[in-house]
Image (spheres, coloured by chain):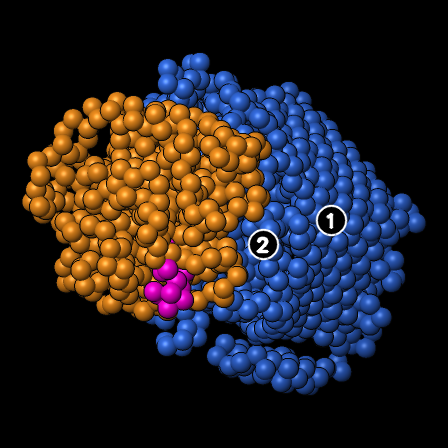
Chain colours: A blue, B orange
Amino acid sequence: MLLGTVKPELIYLGATMQKSYVNLLPLIILVLWSIRLDAQAPSSGSLSGVVRNAKGDRVQNASLYFDKTEYSTHADSEGKFYIRSLPQGQYRLTISAMGYDLYKANIAITAGKNMTHVAILKQCISALDEVSVVGKSGVLEVKETPFNVVALDAKSHYNATLDVAGLLDKASGVKIRESGGIGSDMNITLNGFTGRNIRVFMDGVPMQGMGSAFQLNNIPVNIAERIEVYKGVVPIEFGADALGGVINIVTNRTRNTTLDASYSIGSFNTHKSNISLNHTFKSGISLQLNAFQNYSDNDYKVKTVYRLFAEGGNNDDGWSQNAGWSTDSAWFRRFHDTYRNETVMARVGIVGKKWADRMLFGLTLGQEKKDIQHGSEMKYAFGERTAHSKSILPSFVYDKRNLIIEGLSVRVNGNFNYQKSGTVDTTSYKYSWTGERVPIGGLRGTGVSYGEAGFGVTEFTNRNESATANIGYRIDHSHSVAINSVATNYTRKPVLADIAQRLYPGLPTAADSMSRSSFQNILGIEYRFSYKRRWNTNLFAKHYRIDASGPQSDEGLTYRKNENAQKMGYGIATTYFFTDLQLKASAEKAYRLPNDRELFGDEILEVGNITLRPEQSNNYNIGFTLNKKLSPAYTLYVDWSGYYRDTYDFIQTALDRIGDDLNGISVYRRANHGRVTRLGTDVETRIYYKNIATLGATMTYMDIRDKAKYKDLSGNLVNGNYNYRMPNLPYFFWHVDASYYVHNLMGRGNTLNLNYTFNFVDRIYRNAIAYGDRDTKDFIAKQVYSDLSATYIMKNGRYNVSLEARNLENAILYDNFSLQKPGRRFSLKLRYFFIKR
Amino acid sequence: MKTQVISKSWMLALTAVAIIGCSKNNPEQPEPNPNPEENMEGQFLVAATVDNSTYLLTAAALDDENASITTIGQGLEYSGTFSNYMQNGYQGFTAINYGRGDAHLGQRFTVSTEGKPERLGAQFEIQNGFITAGIVGDVAYSLMSGGRSSDPTLATINRIPMSAGDPSHKFFKVNEFPGFEGRNAALLGIADAGNGSFYTGLDFPSDNLDDVIIAKINANSLATEAVYSDTRLTVSGGFYKSARYSQIESAADGDVFVFSGNNPGTKKAGALVIRKGGLGFDKDYYWDLEEASGGYRFRRVWHIVEDKFLLEFYNEKIESGTAANIDNAASQFAIVDMSEKKLTWISGMPAKSDIPDLSVSWPYVFAGKLYIGVTTSTEDPRYYVINPETAIAKKGLSVKNASSIDAATFVQYSGIAKK
């Protein structure tokens, strides 16, 4: 075959690409294009057809390929498929689709002719099998990309009371850190990156700014089909300026009519419910509705020191003795931590039209209300402080494969996030964990005199918009290109009176009255090469642009400054398949654009710096996946990845100088200064015994080192933590889990599933490790705990009952210093699932 | 023109009672010794910060240019930083942090009998916050008052003993100062007046009072013992954002020097004196420090020895009639000899342009020498040892791997309080 002769050049080009610059990319694509043209052979035919099920309904999005060749395609949303340029010969066609058995057929292709074929797929029988097959298809597809990605099958957890964050926590390399019970603050660490360096998407739409009513730790796992975790090297379609990686929640996209309703009740008066409805009319109009609700008193017990209020309040000479804390800790039930949220997501539109595979308009409405039990450390108990938020999130998505011409696909989405949130802190009392309270004296150095932490009623609104456009073109089975553009906009108009009052009453400055704005655009271009379905390579480049405008102060003078920064990042991801083994390698030069808080400060404590450059990281990954049938009964799965991240130009506060040695002055400012390296490994291994038992483990170890040699920008002050581990990051954690299935228990189609998980997280130091006597340092102790669940699935999954026990040992657990998480707790979940194909 | 006012009130009578009554509070007067600190046994407790944590270290001396201490693997860690350090005798210090909207926290530190830095008592919380603080006798006090409180007629004072004991607090009226009844004062600074009393500057920001007005208050009963005012200077007190600093200090002989940094810009930065035992400002003493310094105004004042004081000047001259910007940097220092009326700029310190604002530690005077820890952009934070006679600074102990040095105090072995 002609393609065979192309191979050496491609390998050569691939090697060049790693070293050369992205501006060669168009040239390379052009060269490869011309190779393709040469490869067009006159002696070929084509195959078209349709995929249906036994009832005659069309099966959408099935994937088709010819065994032992590079030829493959997908059926469209109407079940139709077409493969061109097939050399004459005999082929073995394989079709896989969610919920159906694998389909195989022999096909003969004749030169110059179009052959037709109708495939009738058989539905899977067992509900359990269905769950795993349904999950696998999408999950497998993701896992087989060249990227360092973990795909979590959400469907197999639908009977658990998990939220999305809880599922993410099971992935290797990922740690979810929560500050308390349900609805508490949460952050994600991914390969040692945290916060701003990880971007979260839902169906490719950024979740940034979606508000606290719609976050990973309150979205039930039932909403997702799968969760993809891209580590370090991120495909262009996310258009994300994330150094650490991307988490993408893929929601259910079935065209079947489904109803999934569940309710759970648990310890601490916890109630969760969720209902999902999907229906597509014959006309192609599709309706999707998801609604969920979480409620908890969160009144679990914590062990803490507590405030002591002196009896009577006054002693003989008129001095009140009430600023003390107990010397010993005691157990208290949380008394002011009620959480509730309600969210409705609705999507309506059309699917399976000639001009659109999907065009959906969505609207998400969410609200949240929570009591705040304590401040940044648990001992500061609050009794009345509350927080609330409301979000409205309209969105739009359009996508079409094979638009106008074969191989051209277009995806456009846009979203607008509007969130109103605030806190109420107007109490005139000070609380203790003992439940006692005393009136606050009424003097504070701030505008309002009362309140436990923030004084008064504060309310702010956030608005942000983003739009993504993605155009892809599949030139043929081996070559495809794509381009992606994401634009986001941010504007902040200060409320002069508010700032003046909060900061320095009576002394507003010029900066206070200036609006701040930033516009960001990330443009990505990608080229994909696939050789006989064995070797897949993605080459990509991303152009980052930021235009910022806001106040800048130099030597006492404040003026409006417009800044523009542009950066070019690029990367490669490649994978090779052997029979049971997949090898992966990827590398990216990634950037993160400074966000509004870094550019403009927070108007209270932080002063911005509009001249900040994007942060940078060179990310490298290698890995393999082994999926081997050891014997008819046993299957082994091993997924290993190793990575190195060299992150620099970190935005930090550092000592700096304005002006020259003679006339300048020294100042502290936000600057691109830090450097951190991360060398780590993630492993997941699993052994399956028939469909009866599995034993698995994931392990994450990271060596995250502070590599900034100097503390200041001019290099005079040595950084004492240089070469030491970075603080306050979980760096070694693992879990082991075992599942056991009893099939056809008390009736055919009924399954009992028992699952046990044992978790370990190593000690974490709160502050930089280099400094201070180790014995005096604050740390989060080693965490060891386990979870147990039992699920009984009836009628092939139509009725489900789950019992869960978490933190069986009733261990005192912390993710953050001093902020204790719930102890042993139980829950019962009832779920009903209906599907009509 | 009114030049001097002594508020004659029943408070004066109380003062006399208080002096007699309080004398028994200091039963252990040490034998006169020209320089007792030179022979003391103990070590220095040094507070340094790295990022957002504080490390308490020990050092045998602060003088040696070639000596250094480090935070690497050394020192007691405290998660958090402090805005104010108060050196308390030879026992350690009381450190408190201005918390803005959050709790205003504090911690006392000393050196254990094993010679290691240790916490004295638990972390404490200052009731109602503070904007100014100081030591009276051997007890630390913090004070909150001002127009932004819900009840501007009230101030809250917190009393923090140098022991593991809990702090206590008390309210008192700030609209009843004799001569200024009905006007709400903000209290600036707490300067030990001896015998359990303190001086504080009174600021009446909303009453167009542009005189220097100070009060002497009994720290236990919170009774006003005296109020003095004078038209030659404006308000006595240093301003930095929400923080307020004392500009009143006693000389070794008991004369009380009242400075004014001329914060509003309406008069001149200068000083007056209340002679020991005097009932008001000395009419014959006035020193225009703005002129003496070549046009600079100052923010903080500390006593060194005899009648020599350390002044922290703003780096830039401020136009007459203009209020000092509360954000202005102040990192140049001078020693003023009050009787000689001699101002000497400290030499041998890093250039003011090398010192970021508020990167100078709380000064400490020990054995007749002045120690200032300085963070610069050119080398590791370091102590400078200043001879008060010559105002010449020499390099002292270097503190490696610290973002800044915040304070030092000498802790006497025998004086370590273990309660």
Mark 2 surroundings within 10 Å by alpha-carbon count, few (fewer than 14), some (14 through 19), many (20 or more): few
Q: Which one is nearer the viewer's eye here, B183 or A93?
A: B183
- Counting residues from the start of the chain, the first of labels 2 and 1 encountered is 1
Q: Amino acid at mark 1?
A: Tyr
Which residue is disc 2 drawn over?
A507
Q: Is residue B128 above or below residue B250?
A: above
Question: Is any atom of residue B185 visible in this view?
Answer: yes
Furthest residue in direction front, as rendered: B1
Furthest residue in direction right, as rendered: A283
Q: Residue at x 24, y 24 (%)?
A: B20
Secondary structure found at label 1: strand
Give the magenta range: B288-299
- Does the CB distance between marks 2 and 1 fall below 8 Å? no
Q: In 3D space, how far apart are the residues under numbered discs 2 and 1 (Cα atoms)? A: 32 Å
Asked if the stretch drawn in magenta spans residue B226, the answer is: no
Which residue is disc 1 drawn over?
A418
Q: Which one is nearer the viewer's eye here, B7 or A301?
A: B7
- Depth check, mark 2 against mark 1: the one in front is 2
